[in-house]
Amino acid sequence: MNRAIVATTLRQRFTSPMRVALLLFFSVPPLLGALFMPAAGLSLLGDSYGAALVFAAGMIGQDVSSGTLQLLLARPVRRSEYVLSRWLAVALATIAVVWTQIAIATLLLGARQAAPAARDVLALAGGDALLALGMAAVMALLSSLAPGLADLGLLLVANVTATALGAFAQFRHWVALARGAQEIGRFLKPEVSLAPMLQGGAVSWFEIVSWLSTVTLCLALAIAVTNRWELSYASS
Amino acid sequence: MTGIRIETLTRTYRAGQVRALDGVSLAIAPGEVFGIIGPNGAGKTTLLGCLLGFLRPDAGSITVDGHAPDDLAIRRVTGYLPERLTLDRWMSGAGFLAYHHALAGLAAASRARDVAAALERVGLDATAGARAIRRYSRGMLQRLGLAQALLGDPRYVFLDEPASGVDPAGVVLFRRLLNEARARGATVVLNSHQLDQVERVCDRVAFVSRGRVEAMETLAAGAAAARVLRVRAAGALPTREALALAAAGAGAELLEVASPLARFAVADDAAAARLVAALVAAGVPVAEAASEEGRLERLFLEGPAAPGGSA
Ligand SMILES: Nc1ncnc2c1ncn2[C@@H]1O[C@H](COP(=O)(O)OP(=O)(O)OP(=O)(O)O)[C@@H](O)[C@H]1O
Ligand SMILES: [Mg+2]
């Protein structure tokens, strides 16, 4: 992990007008909801998927196509270090935003005499953090494979394919294929729902192991891909 | 420190269709300022790409101080200025240098001071340093790029067309910075089309064409070098025969007469001095006698097969 890359990526993400505008567009309305419809509680907030995409899009591919990577990788920085630092920074940026949103919503709900249970706040915040780390890993892989913002396109294609496969499998009653499509979907959105666990229910080891393996696999593949790159002025 | 060793390096693109480097062998000594010149598409940038470990050779080998070129120990002591400079446009110039200062693993304690000094070194003031890179002019970008390459006084400096887009004052400044790098013992590899600059800063120059080193020129040896002396007379020159005779008597050779100019081939400084004395003795009103520059230009235009200007 490289502190300079993490810090600079955070600054880059939070000073990009486009990304900040998108974030405000998606995260302010739910807060207004908390203010005016307190009965709905925290459920209005959704998860960290959108924020993760806003921060993650182009996390590696844009460095490749802009050409800034040439200078960075001429420095004593391992490519794995670069990938992991970008991943962590994107995830941290997402977590910072969604946690801020949760904190504000909790305060607003409290002011409207509808304060959520601490357990629910924790479950939401924890789940959002795990999803942010997971999505950042998925996007690190996709972004290492495609230039610019094309990682978003790859994600869309993969999701559409998984959905179509799932529908087709359901229609033909092919259980194995349906199961496979579901797994792809889980891979494309690695999350762990903490609510049942915090409410004293059983710990879903399957979800935890599946999340861990997705994150590890995505990061390992992203590192393998970047290690194979050759950099020249025509690299994009 | 063993310097840079390149052995029979071959590199192709597009599954072998483009042979960008074809059996290049070079040994660059520590502390040497080495120039690479050659026509567009000759393979100069590809060679730097291999030197940095960005491109994998098809065959042959490169070592820098005995290490692989992508060894982090070598990266720590290397500064690089790419041909197509794209910097992080959203950063300020000073922020960019601070970032690279950190990436290079230089001490955080001296960061602010080093960044200010680096900006000043390339003629950018604090106001320019505070401005966003996206508002930089072409030459300012190039200056910032060079400041970045020289951060921490690296032992190896690889520059691809460093002076492109830079104003004349900048060109002079860059030359001074390269001479400073040489003075502190850095090994510099420089690609450039500005032959007069190359001629003035480099110790040795390789002429690369179609992926091969076609010629090698040593420029450093001033006093001992054979060269062409251009003589301008204040009035009319004597006959060609008289000039040739005077030259032969001084151990020089008359190459060309176009009154009031004449060109002579001389072996070294002493021969040049003898020639001037002989010309004056023969009644030539010598107004000016100067070594002809442009050795590299001739190499470029006439190719290595033609006589290189020295007799
Ligand atoms: N990534 C690439 N893919 C395909 N061909 C390439 C690539 N990079 C370089 N080439 C080709 O390799 C040859 C050498 O290119 P290179 O950039 O090394 O030349 P150069 O000497 O630096 O030229 P210039 O003086 O114009 O900068 C050229 O024919 C070029 O088209
Ligand atoms: Mg080039």
Image (tube, grey):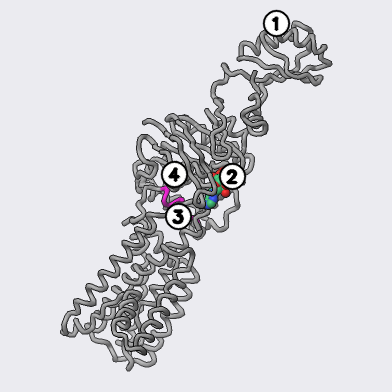
Q: Which mark is residue B57?
A: 4
Query: Callout 3 environment at 10 Å: few (<14), some (14 to 19), or many (20+)?
Result: many
Residue A126 appears in which quarter of the rendering?
bottom left
Residue at the disc numbered 2: B41
- Say which element carries label 3: helix
Lateral position of residue A17 relative to residue A43, left or right: right
Does residue A34 sit above or below B167 in this rendering? below
Magenta range is: A67-74
Does residue B19 sit above or below A49 in this rendering? above
Chain ID at mark 3: A
The answer to whether tags 1 and 4 share a subunit is yes
Q: CA distance from mark 2 to mark 4?
A: 17 Å
Identity of the residue drawn at 40% across and 78% down? A159
Lateral position of residue B205 relative to residue A191, left or right: right
Q: Nearer the viewer, residue A9 or B111?
A: A9
- Name the spot of residue B85 as percent of width and height, x first: 53, 51
Question: Can I make out residue B72 in this image?
Answer: yes
Chain ID at mark 1: B
Q: Which mark is residue B249?
A: 1
Residue at the disc numbered 3: A69
